[in-house]
C-alpha cells in the first residue's frame, strides 16, 4: 500500500457492487488514486461515496467499442496507471438463465469475462507505469471451451461462465509472454469460492466466504513485494495454483490471440 511515497494510481473495473466496490474503497482509503469503473452512472455515483478522491469511468464492457473508448480515456491518465484490476464479470445468472449476447454478437460471459479484460489490458499495457501490475480476477471454477461452438449449444449459464474463466486464464498466460507486456506483469487470481456478492446470490446458491477474503487475495497479487516480476501465473488466493489444462494449450491460446487481434484492429479503426 501507499505509505508516504508517491501516490500510486489504480484502475479497477466492475466497482459498483461486491468485490470491486470493496477493492476500490480499500485502495482509495489507503492513499491510492483510484479510477473506478461501472456501466451505470447512478450506481457509480453511489459507489463513489466510499472511494475518497476516486474518479468514475463509465463503459459497458459487453461492447468492444466501449472497451476501446475506456482504454483511450485511461491511457491519458496522469500519473500513469500502476495497477489495473480487471474485476468486472458476469456470473452464472439465475438457474433458468437464457443465452445473452454482447453488442458484437459474442456470448455475453465470454465477451465480458474474457475478451473485455484481455482487450483492455492489451490496449493499456503500453501506457502503464514501468513495473505496473495487471491482475485478472478469475476463478478455479473452469471448464473446456469448444472454439467451434461459440454460442454454446445447448446453453447453460454455469458452463458459459466456466469456459469464459478458463479462457481468461489462457489469455493471461499468453499476453504475459507478449513483448508488448514487457514493462508490466500480468497474473490471474481466484479470489475465493462463492464470495458474498450479488453475482453469487443471483445464481441461487448460498455464499461461503466473506468479501474480505477476496479483497485480501486480490490485493496480495496486486501489491505484495514478493511478487515483483512474477508474471503469467495463476493464484488460488495467495497460493500459486494451476488453471484448467486447456488454458495452457498453445492451440487454444493461438486462437484466442487471433480473436483479440481482430477486435483490437476494430478499436483502432473506430
Image: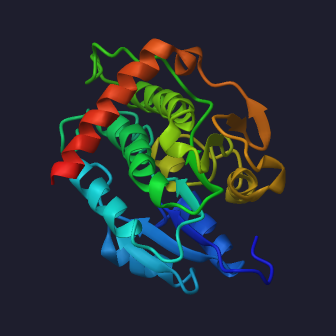
Relative image position of residue 12 (x, y in whole percent):
51, 62
Position of 62 with respect to 51 (left or right) is: left
Position of 107 with respect to 94 (left or right) is: left
Quadrant of residue 153 within the rendered picture: top left
75 shown above or below 147: below
Position of 49 with respect to 187 (left or right) is: left
Pick whichever, 167 or 102, lies toward us.
167
The reply to whether residue 151 is visible in this rendering is yes
Q: What quarter of the picture does the N terminus occupy?
A: bottom right
Quadrant of residue 4 within the rendered picture: bottom right
The reply to whether residue 100 is visible in this rendering is no
Relative image position of residue 68 (x, y in whole percent):
28, 55
Pick whichever, 202 or 186, lies toward us.
186
Q: Residue at x 43, y 37 (%)?
A: 92
Pick whichever, 96 or 257, lies toward us.
257
Q: Residue at x 55, y 40 (%)?
A: 205
Instruction: Give the number of marks.
Output: 0
Relative image position of residue 233 (x, y in whole percent):
67, 34
Color encoding of the figure: rainbow
**Looking at the image, which residue sits at the far left?**
270
Q: Residue at x 64, y 76 (%)?
A: 32
Pick whichever, 96 or 172, lies toward us.
172
Quadrant of residue 101 within the rendered picture: top left
Relative image position of residue 212 (x, y in whole percent):
72, 59
Q: What quarter of the picture does the C terminus occupy?
A: bottom left
Q: Residue at x 73, y 46 (%)?
A: 229
Amino acid at each position: 500500500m501507499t505509505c508516504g511515497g508517491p501516490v500510486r494510481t489504480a484502475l479497477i473495473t466492475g466497482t459498483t457492487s461486491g468485490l470491486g466496490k470493496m477493492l476500490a474503497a480499500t485502495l482509495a482509503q489507503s492513499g491510492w488514486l483510484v479510477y473506478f469503473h461501472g456501466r451505470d452512472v447512478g450506481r457509480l455515483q453511489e459507489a463513489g461515496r466510499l472511494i475518497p478522491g476516486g474518479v468514475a469511468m463509465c463503459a459497458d464492457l459487453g461492447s468492444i467499442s466501449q472497451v476501446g473508448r475506456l482504454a483511450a480515456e485511461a491511457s491519458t491518465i496522469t500519473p500513469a496507471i500502476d495497477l489495473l484490476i480487471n474485476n468486472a464479470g458476469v456470473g452464472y445468472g439465475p438457474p433458468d438463465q437464457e443465452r445473452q449476447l454482447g453488442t458484437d454478437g459474442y456470448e455475453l460471459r465470454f465477451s465480458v469475462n474474457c475478451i473485455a479484460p484481455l482487450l483492455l489490458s492489451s490496449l493499456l499495457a503500453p501506457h502503464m507505469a514501468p513495473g505496473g501490475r495487471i491482475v485478472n480476477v478469475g476463478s478455479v471454477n473452469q471448464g473446456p471451451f469448444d472454439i467451434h461452438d461459440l454460442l454454446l449449444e445447448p446453453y447453460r449459464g454455469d458452463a458459459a461462465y466456466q469456459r469464459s474463466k478458463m479462457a481468461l486464464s489462457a489469455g493471461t498466460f499468453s499476453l504475459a509472454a507478449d513483448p508488448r507486456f514487457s514493462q508490466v506483469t500480468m497474473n490471474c487470481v481466484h479470489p475465493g469460492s462463492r464470495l458474498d456478492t450479488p453475482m453469487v446470490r443471483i445464481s441461487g446458491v448460498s455464499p461461503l466466504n466473506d468479501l474480505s477474503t477476496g479483497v485480501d487475495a486480490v490485493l496480495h497479487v496486486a501489491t505484495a513485494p514478493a511478487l515483483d516480476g512474477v508474471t503469467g501465473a495463476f493464484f488460488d488466493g495467495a497460493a500459486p495454483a494451476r488453471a484448467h489444462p486447456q488454458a495452457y494449450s498453445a492451440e487454444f491460446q493461438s486462437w484466442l490471440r487471433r480473436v483479440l487481434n481482430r477486435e483490437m484492429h476494430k478499436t483502432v479503426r473506430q
